[in-house]
Amino acid sequence: MKKTGFTLVEVMFSVFIAMYIFLSAWAIFVMGYKWWYEISPQTECQRIARLTIQVISEGFSDPTAGTDIINSVTYKRRAGAEWTSRTSADAQNATFVTPTISSDQHRLYFKLEPDPTASNTRSFYLGQYNTSLNALYYQYGSNTPTVIKGTEGLTSLTFETVTGYSNLIKVTATAQKTVMGSRTTPYQISVVYTDFIYLRNV
């Protein structure tokens, strides 16, 4: 009776293939691990910073900002700083010229087009969301401030005027996250995002 079995070459070849599959799977796992724990927080910081500047600039639909009627349909206007308007009231009121930046450069005050007076002061600023996080806040007049969801993790927000351009505001938003990653100890990453707001009605 003839005996059958594997030769040494066949066994070695099978082991090689098995090791190749195992190492490929391990490499994919490590890559996914690094992405989730290292790249994902950086992506989240970028999203927070971009969202912050987008909301400050373009705003969101707000019934207090007035409405427009187009083809018999009423649309809410957006309460963003780019819709800032300087009216005749600004010329008469030296203490309020839209927009204004707080002395610490962390808060932007502005007024929207529908209001002919300085009564509808609005502002965006960095506020404390909870004991460990800050976020972007929006406030209309003396009403209760509203936190902008999705900006939790914002660590710095500054506004600056641009020399020679009265219709531009420079905004810098910084977001920070703790990265666990593959290192022995966690570390912090920060993403700084800067853009300019074009004030359409200034």
Image (cartoon, grey):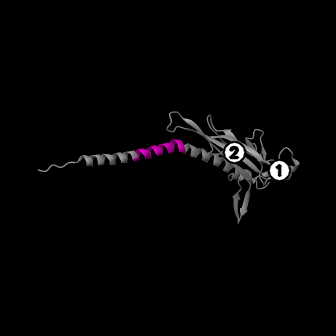
Residue 192 visible, this orientation: yes
In front: mark 2 or mark 1? 2
Q: Secondary structure at mark 1?
A: loop
Outermost residue to the front: 9
- Position of residue 200 measured from the top left corner of the image (x, y, whole percent): 76, 56
**As drawn, 5 above or below 132:** below
Q: Is residue 37 magenta?
A: yes
Magenta highlight on residue 202: no
Mark number, residue 117: 1
Amino acid type, label 1: Thr
Residue that appears at 62% across and 46% down = 48
**Which residue position is annotated with label 2?**
172
Q: Depth check: give the residue in front, 100 or 180.
A: 180
Q: Residue at x 57, y 46 (%)?
A: 43
Image spot of residue 145 (x, y percent): 70, 42
Relative depth, front residue between 165 and 143: 165
User: Amino acid type of disc 2?
Assistant: Thr
Rendering coords of residue 82 (x, y %): 73, 53
Quick one: label 1, few (<14), some, or many (20+) residues within 10 Å? Answer: some
Which residues are the magenta region?
Answer: 24-39
Which quadrant does the C terminus fall into?
bottom right
Looking at this rendering, what residue extends furthest in the right direction?
A: 92
Relative placement, left or right, of 199 versus 187 is right
Is disc 2 placed on a helix, strand or loop?
Answer: strand
Q: Can residue 143 be seen in this snapshot?
A: no
Upstream in the sequence, badge 2 or badge 1?
1
Residue displayed at 71% across by 42% down: 158
Say which residue appears at 56% left-offset and 43% top-offset.
41
